[in-house]
Image (cartoon, rainbow, N blue to C red):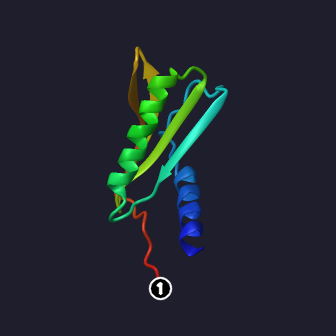
């Protein structure tokens, strides 16, 4: 239960940690938005990457139209990226919206 609360809390902190130099995201009016959130883990990163890859394969097969896919992936305890997966001419493209670095995403569990 503590890990679930930690993940939710981390996601909320990530969402509210925007700075003044953040640009508004265009095209917010989509039929469906999928948010994939992958917090930092010492041993789950390969599985997270496989989940993203499998989702991209599904998007290519279904030729997404009015869907939006946002991925928040922490690749280390101090680095994370927020990017959008877009479908263009038969392939998926990752468009980085924001990169977070030098931020401590982990906490010590007592």
Q: Tell me where residue 73 appears, x and y as whole percent.
A: 42, 49
Considering only vertical position in the picture, is 75 above or below 64? below
Q: Tell me where residue 34 appears, x and y as whole percent.
A: 58, 39
Considering only vertical position in the picture, is 108 above or below 39? below
In the image, 42 versus 105, the foreground residue is 42
Q: Is residue 59 visible?
A: yes
Could you say whether the residue bearing mark 1 is in a helix, strand or loop? loop
In the image, 64 versus 22, the foreground residue is 64
Q: Residue at x 59, y 61 (%)?
A: 8
User: Disc count in the image?
Assistant: 1
Q: Which residue is mark 1?
A: 110
Q: Residue at x 37, y 59 (%)?
A: 44
Quadrant placement of the N terminus: bottom right
Q: Tell me where residue 100 appears, x and y as whole percent.
A: 39, 50
Q: Residue at x 56, y 31 (%)?
A: 68
Tell me if 86 is positioned left or right of 1 in this view.
left
Q: Residues within 10 Å of mark 1 (few under 14, many from 20)?
A: few
Considering only vertical position in the picture, is 90 above or below 18? above
């Amino acid at each position: 239960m503590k890990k679930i609360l930690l993940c939710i809390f981390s996601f909320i902190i990530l969402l509210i940690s925007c700075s003044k130099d953040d640009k508004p995201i265009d095209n917010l009016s989509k039929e469906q938005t999928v948010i994939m959130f992958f917090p930092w883990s010492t041993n789950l990163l390969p599985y997270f990457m496989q989940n993203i890859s499998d989702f991209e394969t599904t998007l290519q097969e279904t030729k997404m139209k009015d869907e939006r896919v946002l991925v928040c992936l922490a690749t280390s305890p101090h680095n994370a990226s927020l990017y959008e997966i877009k479908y263009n001419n038969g392939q998926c493209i990752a468009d980085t919206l924001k990169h977070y670095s030098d931020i401590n995403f982990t906490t010590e569990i007592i």
